[in-house]
Image: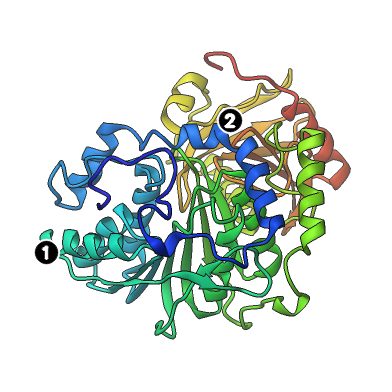
Amino acid sequence: MTSRELTGFLPLTEGDDNAGRRPDNATLSDLAWRIGFGAISWPWLLASLSGGRKADKRVLMDELDLAPDALPHLGSWKADVGFLRHIVREITRLRPAHVVELGAGASSLVAAKALALHGGGQLHSFDQHGGFVDATRNWLADNGLSVDIRHAPLDAEIADWPGRWYAIDDLPDQIDLIIIDGPPWTVHPMVRGAADSLFARLSPNGVVLLDDAARPGERLVARRWRERWPHIDFRLVQDGTKGTLVGRRRDMSQPAANDNDRGRFMRHGARAAIIAALVGTGWIARGQMGEFPQAAQAQTFLDEAAASHRTGLLRQAMISQIESPRIDAPEIARSTGITLPALPAGWTVRDVQLYPTTDSPAVAVSLVTARGERVSLFADRTETPAEDKPLLARRATDTIAYWESRDTAFALTGPVDSARALVLAAMVARGQGLPNTQ
């Protein structure tokens, strides 16, 4: 079978290919993780059954000049339209010479076609199911696409990550784009963390794309990646049914760091104990597992918030630029998926603009507080370490207080001290939603 066929709820099993069988050295603690996360991950698994809107898929097929039925079935363990669009977007922007894909399928067709249209780079794809690899290679050939797709059994171990990993060899020295859509969570909920064994090969401005990034296991992976790879900016984008983690390598003045010498990710007993504690306290059930308290690591989001504040002030000072001081909250929510909080009494809106970011349009609102302070509220569908409690950052003469509500991050920026920034942010964060217009 290939990704053209309709698939079931769970990934391919040993019945589909012997390469997917459970090896003798699989640990009981790994089994405990699978059972624990299986019990709490069903909302994400149910959401993944939808591969995205048919209209969005048609647009994607048209953009790639593929037949409308080139991908007749998406969803389940396959990539959804949101993740596939990220692949096309990054290939269009990067014009990569080498793309490495972990987990073949629908993403292979889309990536190969996008490469053929934008620069002609090489796709190196790996999957643990030998029969699936052969069928996918033939399927891509039927579409006029040649891909370096290889069978990579799950019989390797990465010293500081749990589960089994692809037996990969003969990789390019520099990789411009890494697409991670495997192995499945049924191997281990955090098995995809081992993909960071490739991050040292990431080229300047290279990108990492992780599918299923909204799931609890992948959120823990993202947390550790942020700690281990400080020169890669990671952000969760919730524009599909399963979420995509986008990582961009930004600082090439230092070598890529890795903490492999810290040893295995968690020892067997500790892993099982953490599972029990998280389930027992309801942390996971409340959807709060994404980030444990840590130092602020949201450089890209903060830079964009600061830039939007400066741009807003510049617009207000220019005679030729016409401000838009009216907020239409329902229209903003429909167009961007961003629900703005209610503004405190006595605050005045000076300007409302869509602000282009790398992954999605954000909203920038220029405001004047009841005391006459000129601040900006920046909102984007992304992830930061702040959660629902504001954190602080500085950019030049401005203080930024930022927090999260559901899947949207907010930043309040202005020339105020830290204490005042937290007070203003708390006033805004308490809002439950804007009226229809303001």
What x and y, as percent, mark residue 38? 60, 40
Relative horizontal placement of residue 393, taking residue 79 as reference (left or right):
right
Mark 2 or 1: the one toward you = 1
Q: Which residue type does callout 2 highlight? A: Arg
Q: Quadrant of residue 146?
A: bottom left
Q: Earlier in the sequence, mark 2 or mark 1?
A: 1
Point 14% across, 64% down: residue? 141
What SS does tag 2 mark? strand
Q: Residue at x 50, y 80 (%)?
A: 201
Is 169 placed above or below 45 here? Answer: below
Q: Is residue 56 left or right of residue 49?
A: left
- Badge 1 marks a residue whose secondary structure is loop
**Amino acid type of the residue tagged 1 in the rendering:** Gly
Q: Which mark is residue 350?
A: 2
Q: Is residue 112 left or right of residue 350?
A: left
Residue 161 seen anywhere in this rendered image of the structure: yes
Residue 292 drawn at (x, y percent): 77, 49
**Label 1 Cα crowd, 10 Å radius (few <14 / some 14-19 / many 20+):** few
Q: Nearer the viewer, residue 162 or 413?
A: 162
* Picture quadrant of residue 421: top right
Mark 1 — residue?
144
